[in-house]
Amino acid sequence: MPAPITEQAERVLSLWQGSWVAAFAVGILVWGLMIWSIIFHRKRSEQLPPQVRYNMPIEALYTILPIVVISVLFYFTARDQAYLLDTEEPADVHVEVVAFQWAWQFNYMDAAKADGGEVLHSEVGIPNPDGTADRSTQATLVLPENSVVHFDLHSPDVIHSFWVPAFAFKMDVVPGRDNAFQVRIDEGTAGEYVGRCAELCGVDHTRMLFNVEVLPQDEYEAWAQEQEAAASEEARAEENDA
């Protein structure tokens, strides 16, 4: 598993590890019972063992025990799923993610899309004309550490899937459907990461890549101010040309 950089990713990692512990425990129990039966109940003579129609304690055990195991796994999965999909906490940054064939667009908003947020500035990836993955043309998602980030996901064409492995989480980007989730980025995680589409979205699916850069809070604020100023200047220039 990639090193988690969000609180939500740490929860996913914990659930993953717990599931493996449960799987190993069940596997050891089952193999232990099989080996015990093979060694201590192997054929010793031609005498036919006593024949019984059923064994109530054993049948109750192998009926109740799987129900208990599945119920425990279901509880922790449902609990963590509710936590991962919770978007009630006020966010510090709002990003609208638009996935299209074959690149990504990141619109930085002043509020969530559902609340009528307006675009402050955008970052748009450019599909490489020769059909290869070119890192220089890929969009870069810039985020601040130690902050809550809200993502709104949209697609104008086909189903994509927004995936940052360091988030240990991915969500489909479905045409005509607004999906959203939030993450709290941990402090001390500044650095560069990768992002990609995790849904087979067509012939050039492999080009659906993007970069992720996590910055310290002060550097992010300076970067955001520069981007907003550049966007405002570009908008004024377009108005003057019109």
Image (tube, rainbow, N blue to C red):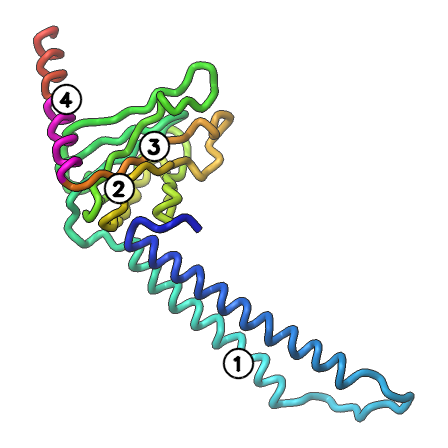
Q: State yes or no: residue 133 in magenta.
A: no
Asked if the residue under mark 2 is in contact with the one under mark 3, i.e. CB atoms within 8 Å, the reply is no
Q: CA distance from mark 3 to mark 2?
A: 13 Å
Q: CA distance from mark 4 to mark 3?
A: 21 Å
Task: Provide the residue designation for mark 1.
Answer: 64
Q: CA distance from mark 4 to mark 1?
A: 62 Å
In the image, taking residue 172 as reference, residue 225 lies left or right, namely left
In the image, taking residue 2 as reference, residue 241 lies left or right, namely left
Secondary structure beneath label 1? helix
Task: Provide the residue designation for mark 3.
Answer: 211
Q: CA distance from mark 1 to mark 3?
A: 48 Å
Query: Which class describes the residues within 10 Å of circle 4: few (<14), some (14-19), or many (20+)?
Result: some
In the displayed structure, 43 sits above or below 92; it is: below
Q: Nearer the viewer, mark 3 or mark 2?
A: 2
Q: Nearer the viewer, mark 4 or mark 3?
A: 3
Q: Nearer the viewer, mark 4 or mark 2?
A: 2
Mark 1 vs 3, N-terminal side: 1
Secondary structure beneath label 2? loop
Q: Which contiguous range is marked in magenta?
A: 218-229
In the displayed structure, 122 sits above or below 186; it is: above
Task: Provide the residue designation for mark 4.
Answer: 231
